[in-house]
Image (cartoon, helix red, strand yellow):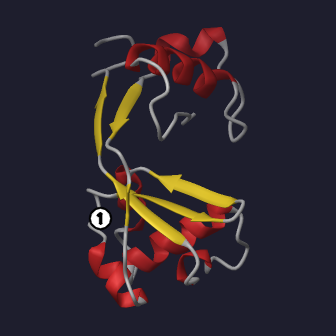
Amino acid sequence: GCVGSMVASEPLYVAVMQSAIAAATRDTRFYPVDPGELSSITIEISVLSPSRRLSFSSIEELKALLVPGVHGVVLRNGPLSAVYLPEVWEVFGHEKDPKEAFLTSLSHKAGDPTGHLWRRPDTIVEVFEAVSFSETAPGVA
């Protein structure tokens, strides 16, 4: 699973423990982790920078501001919001327009069935960076 917080509200070690438990047991996209699976799980942690809001006047300007593989992206519009970590860019590298595919997918994740949430002028777009680290193999730090 993938669970966490965009804003620090407790010490990092507490957030890591809480997020690991939540990812293993409460990420609704996956079945909860079975205790028998623990020895085969590799844990990855991403520590995020504060996000910053992008200012842009066109779709092309927005796309020019995004750096694939470096920027994570947050979309917000009313009750709709979604986040992709910088590593998610890898999924869209084969697309004709990777930035458009990334933002369209993120719009769907936010709950917009059209995939056009990112194109709306009232949508807030934020970027952040992440430092990620993981075990080299299950159970090996």
Report the side of 133 relative to 117 (left or right): left
Where, quadrant-wise, is the N terminus in this rendering? top right
For the residue pair 39 and 22, the one nearer the viewer reads as: 22
Asked if 118 appears above or below 16 in the picture, the reply is below
Q: Position of residue 82 (x, y in %)?
A: 58, 56
Secondary structure beneath dot 1 equals loop
Residue at 49% across, 11% down: 39
How many numbered tags mark residues here?
Answer: 1
The residue under label 1 is 68
Q: Amino acid at mark 1?
A: Pro
Residue at 36% across, 51% down: 87
Q: Position of residue 27 (x, y in %)?
A: 67, 34
Q: Position of residue 140 (x, y in %)?
A: 31, 12
Residue at 41% across, 55% down: 88
Q: Position of residue 119 (x, y in %)?
A: 54, 83
Residue at 46% across, 67% down: 125
Q: Quadrant of residue 36?
A: top right
Q: Quadrant of residue 3?
A: top right
Mark 1, residues whose alpha carbon is within 10 Å: few (<14), some, or many (≥20)? Answer: some
Q: Quadrant of residue 109?
A: bottom right
Asked if 139 appears above or below 6 in the picture, the reply is above
Report the side of 126 relative to 123 (left or right): left
For the residue pair 109 and 117, the one nearer the viewer reads as: 117
Where, quadrant-wise, is the C terminus in this rendering? top left
